[in-house]
Amino acid sequence: MTEPLLVAKNIFKSYPQGAGELKILNGISINIQAGESISIVGSSGAGKSTLMHILGTLDRPSAGELIVAGQNVLAMNDDELALYRNSQMGFVFQFHHLLQEFTALENVAIPLRIAGVEKVQALAQAAHFLGSLGLGARGGHYPSQLSGGELQRVAIARALVCRPKILFADEPTGNLDSKNSLLIQDLFFELKEKFGLTLVVVTHDANFAKKFSRALRISDGQWAN
Amino acid sequence: MQTFLHSAAKPTNNWSQLKFLVWLSSKFLLSKSKALFQGTAWVSFAGLILGVACLVLSMAVMSGFESTLKKSVADVTGHMRIRRMGPEKETWPAFFTRLQAQEPQIKDYVRYAYLEGVLAGQGKITGVLFQGVDTKKVSEVLNLKSRIVAGEFKLSEGDMPDVLLGKGLAQQFQLKVGDQFRIVFPMPSDLDPTQFKRKVVTFKLAGLLDLGAKGFDERMVVGSLQTAQRLADTERSSGIFIRLQELDKAREISTRLSRTLGANYQVSDWRDLNENLFEAIQIERIVVFFVILIIVIAAAFNVSSTLYINVLKRYPDIGVLKAMGFSKKRIVQLFSLQGLLMGLLGLVLGVTLGWIMCQAFSWAEVFFSFIPSSVYKLDRIDLNIRFVDIAIISVVTLLICFLATLTPALRGASLTVVEGIKND
């Protein structure tokens, strides 16, 4: 068996609350193989988003280990982690979180600029990527001029433009109508095949969750099964 | 496609990264939805502009005061003055040749003689200083011609010599060009040196001079050296006025010459005449600068609070930028740059407003007397916007704006990705 792409061991997360603490995650462990697709479901407050944030290095656990591609990422400082995320991980959130002042094309180009790609080259690559998602004609539009489905597709393009190994998504269809939701769901799997991505998606949608190679349920900060 | 993207992601230089940050900052700055210039933000920004404008005007006034007085002294009495105190051992041309060999900065000289006199008329009486200058060389050293405001530059000899008068003196005695007037000169008696004999001379007013400083304008009569020598019954002159290649070298050259020429000569430069005043101006300039700088500092704090609010509005954007790989350092740079861009804009507009205020001040000076000439020796200031003043104002303003924006920038940087994203 090949080495897992991501290994999380005994992940705990708690927040101070008054004199005590609020426990969100209680010793969760998970191994994720490269190319795998995993959905995480659970009721609100179960800790699924917190787990995704920790796996995606957006937050640090109170205790536990996190190894990504053989590297102990928790040993890195915040700035090293930021660079690491830029090259290895992509994120899609429930709300698109596109920057309102920038066109769709510029939004997609920003991760490349952060990575150090020159402006002209970054915009060319972003245009190419948007084109491959059927948004070539919308590159010059601002977020306020795009529909919900288009916004989420631009957000996906932005998450993937630096060619990450893992794509994390936190309820990516939670804000869409059923038609657009299905389109985005199909797009995720299409891109997963096209780029050999590893997918970790948090969702409330049971039908969407079933489409993944592994569907995990979280309850009270632990795996339910 | 897999290789296409990775091969392109080569690290770029710092200049490219700076351009990227400037691009992001300027877009954030001019955003319609979360712009910095919204509501009361304009008021704080206007405060910054006004503060800078006041600094420009006050520095222009202080520098103008100094340069107006400096120019006046240099125009009327040269860059330096050397008086012979002892017996005449060598001619002035020979002395000058020796001087020039020692100090190559010295460009030219003109002989002069001073006589004290009394001008009476219109029921008034006042002491005057008759400055006789060598008419052949006067224009090489002094700049009196450009100060003529009425009549012509004419210094003749004869029984009724043509002379020039300071405009204040002429106004006091209601003298017009072409008028004749008399000056009484007290001369030491040949028989008894403790006694004076009086010599009354009638002059013709050829032109009026605006000499810049009140002290000159209300006291100075300019005539020819020959007239002064004839009145004093001597071939001698009091000394020479000297012109240098650079006016600002006068102090160091006069100090050196004082040492080398010895007690027979008294060397002074343009600054000596108003030493205390020039020193007071220097101190006042510093005090005024710091007092008005408080306006800029207060305005910068307002800009800081505006930026702080902007950082709060941008929590989701900061979160997503961090998720995409923006480091803390870059978040600090991003918001500091916004502060700097605001500061730069405020500076440009402030300097422009300051320049307009200077023009308005110069225009209003013609009609209103802002400066009591009895105190400041000048009745008008030619405002001087110096590059060095603007440079200092620019550096200090940008530094203050930068420091004021550090707190909100650091607040933005300390935000975690999760805090940012959940804040939408």
Image (cartoon, coloured by chain):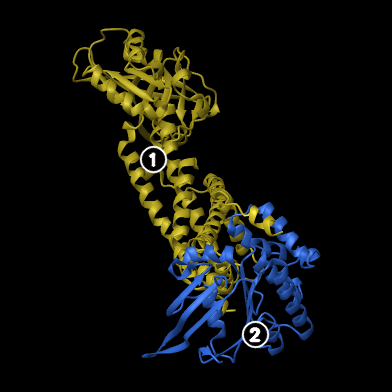
Chain colours: A blue, B yellow
Number of the label disc, if any, that sits on residue A203:
2
The amino acid type of the residue labelled 2 equals: Thr
* Residue closest to the eye, A208 or A138: A208
Number of the label disc, if any, that sits on residue A85:
none
From the top left corner, tell me how far across and down residue B65 is, in percent.
43, 41
Residue that badge 1 annotates: B377
Disc 2 crowd rating (10 Å Cα; few below 14, some 14-19, many 20+) is: many
Residue B280 quadrant: top left
* Residue closest to the eye, A110 or A90: A90
* Residue closest to the eye, B50 or B398: B398
* Residue closest to the eye, B76 or B22: B22
From the viewer's perspective, is residue A38 above or below residue B144? below
Q: Which chain is mark 2 on?
A: A
In this view, the residue farthest toward the front is A1
From the top left corner, tell me how far across and down residue B189 is, in percent.
23, 16
Q: Is B67 left, or right, of B279 in this rendering?
A: right
From the viewer's perspective, is residue B359 above or below residue B181? below
Q: Is B119 left, or right, of B357 in this rendering?
A: left
Q: Is residue A28 visible?
A: yes
Tell if the residue under mark 2 belongs to the same chain as the one under mark 1: no
Residue at 38 percent of width and 43 percent of height = B376
From the top left corner, tell me how far across and down residue A94 is, in percent.
65, 80
Q: How many labels sit on residues?
A: 2
The amino acid type of the residue labelled 1 equals: Lys
Q: Indicate the secondary structure of the residue bearing disc 1.
A: loop
Q: CA distance from mark 2 to mark 1?
A: 83 Å
Q: Quadrant of the C terminus of chain B?
A: bottom right
Q: Indicate the secondary structure of the residue bearing disc 2.
A: loop
Q: Nearer the viewer, mark 2 or mark 1?
A: 2
- CB within 8 Å, label 2 to label 1: no
Q: Quadrant of the N terminus of chain B?
A: bottom right
Residue at 43 percent of width and 32 percent of height = B72
